[in-house]
Image: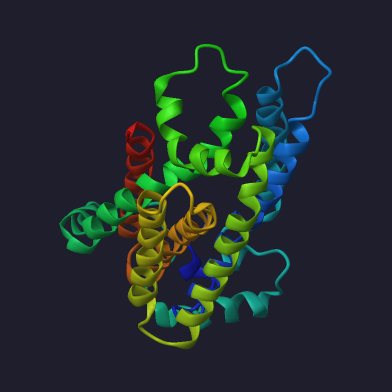
Amino acid sequence: MSCPGMWWTAAEQPLRLEAYYCTNGIATMIGGLLGYAIGHITTGALDRWMYVFIIFGSVSIVWGVVVLLFLPDLPSTAKFLTERERYVAVERVASNRQGVKNTHFKKYQLMQALRDPKTWILFIMAVGAQVPNSALTSVSFFLFLRPKMRGATKLTQRNSQFTSIIVGSFGFDTLGTQYLQVPGGFIQFAALLGGGFICSHFPNSRCIVMIAANLICILGAAMLVGLPASNKWGRLVGLWLCYFQGLGFSMSLTMVSSNVAGYTKKQVTGTILFVGYCVGNIIGKLTP
């Protein structure tokens, strides 16, 4: 898949990338409702949690094939554009000075990426941002699976600690916890789209938006930890505020797409960023 810098100018990228990533919030809302529906499956030889993987996995595979067949890698290969439109599409992003897609590996760009302090700042930020995100994304799912999973571990219990307290205070059963994903998904959707709009209309504001989003996420986590159990609405709001985390991380991806030149360097930087994403998710699941 081509990087955004090959399709849009640097000023256009934040809003368009955030419009893409805000679909995570839509997926969270729809996924919560579908998870509730799947939880009511009472027929068949499979456990309910298996249907989650079968249904969502099948849809992902089918849509992946559609994307592979119809989504072009470059403006110059886009079949829905005329020859002149392809030329214009390439020329309009020439000001990005980020190069074009080149599968030839360039060692010097690899070394530049490894020596660039921005690469490791983004890596550390990705690790830190995904520690709370890991707990958030696995909590509701583990609560949904736990009654059906054989040999549930203490790891599952630790991951669901904060949310299980909130859910218990509201009297929700296991299936009812799926409803809690809907408001959080809407907040994530609105935050990502709003952040992209701000960065597109106010130059040099991406770092400020990232800081603001992460501070809101920290505030939400502090509310979960610090508020008494009797303040159930406050703790629930704190849980929803944690969904601002998605804005901070996705904004770091726009910085890679628009601020890193050279195809090899861009790919290496993006790979390191996603390694940090994976490491943070691993740590989050192991955090007591």
Residue depicted at 61% across the width and 44% down the height: 170
In the foreground, 109 or 252: 252
Residue depicted at 20% across the width and 59% down the height: 112
Q: Is residue 10 above or below residue 62?
A: below
Q: Is residue 179 left or right of residue 76?
A: right
Relative image position of residue 175 (x, y in whole percent): 69, 34
Return the residue found at the far bottom.
202
- Number of disc labels: 0
Q: Is residue 153 above or below residue 202?
A: above
Return the residue found at the far right.
43
Relative image position of residue 171 (x, y in whole percent): 63, 39
Q: How is the image coloured?
A: rainbow
Relative image position of residue 204 (x, y in whole percent): 35, 83
In the foreground, 133 or 60: 133
Q: Is residue 100 left or right of residue 147?
A: left
Residue depicted at 62% across the width and 57% down the height: 183
Q: Quadrant of residue 142?
A: top right
Residue depicted at 39% across the width and 40% down the height: 281
Q: Is residue 113 left or right of residue 215?
A: left
Q: Quadrant of residue 193?
A: bottom right
Relative image position of residue 151 (x, y in whole percent): 50, 12
**What quarter of the picture does the C terminus occupy?**
top left
Q: Quadrant of residue 254?
A: bottom left
Q: Is residue 99 visible?
A: no
Q: Is residue 176 left or right of residue 225?
A: right
Q: Is residue 141 above or below residue 255?
A: above
Q: Is residue 87 visible?
A: yes
